[in-house]
Image (cartoon, rainbow, N blue to C red):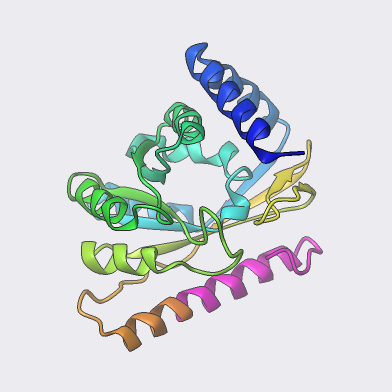
Amino acid sequence: MPLFPIRKSLRECSRYALQHHLMIVAYCITRLYFLTIQIKTVNEAPIRRHLEGGSKLIAAIWHQRIIAVIGYARRFGVYRPSVMISKSRDGDVVADFFRCLGFRPVRGSSSRDGKQALAAMIDDLKDHPFAVHVLDGPQGPRGVVKPGLVALAGKSGIPVVPFYISMSRAWMLRSWDRCLIPKPFSRIVVRWGEPRTVPGDMDERTFEAIRLGIEAHMLENQRRDDRRFGWTDLI
């Protein structure tokens, strides 16, 4: 089947959702769904104290865990975190949903207009304390940290804090990231890592070494958390 009719249909669905404010309905349904799921947090208190003390942070998360974090994300809505979302029609729908969570979408895409999107995030962090960055989005490869995180942290001078989310039971989508959707009555563990400062003045070799270091560290920790629930090779 040609892809064009499928894409056209998806655009029409996105337009309909925006016109009829269906993301608010979807948000309410999602909130009810996540009430069936038990969420445990680890190391959250120091992160809150860091933000409440006037300091700033960039939370780093894998694209695979975006849906799984929805039931928890609202807890940090008080800080009005920014998140980069594409300027596409589908991005409009996603942006509406994240606004319901208390997030502030910054429109742009690391794969299309990366420099403009990076500049927008840096400007946003001058006036706001908290941002969320998807490490390997929006198109992968899965488990590979894109340069945008290192550039954002280095140019803004704001530490990166790893954000891990693991779950007892989940469905896995056939998407590039093998996105995980927690099953009803499953258990989720949300764990915050330790903030890491990235130097502002880096040559290419140092930049790549830092990128690889963050990637290895986050993969190791995420896989370790997953193994506690019996998962292997998720990411």
Question: 26 or 158: which is nearer to us?
Answer: 26
Which segment did they paint magenta? 213-235
Q: Residue reaching furthest top?
A: 20
Which residue is depicted at the point 71% across and 43% down? 181
The correct choice, above or below, for 67 with respect to 100 in the image is: below
Q: Residue reaching furthest bottom?
A: 205
| Quarter the C terminus occupies | bottom right
Q: Position of residue 7 (x, y in %)?
A: 61, 34
Which residue is depicted at the point 40% across and 69% down? 147
Would you say residue 39 is visible in this rendering? yes
Q: Residue 222 in magenta?
A: yes
Label count reads: 0
Where on the picture, by quarter, is residue 141? bottom right
Where on the picture, by quarter, is residue 38? top right
Q: Position of residue 204 (x, y in %)?
A: 31, 84
Q: Residue 152 in magenta?
A: no
The correct choice, above or below, for 99 with respect to 73 in the image is: above
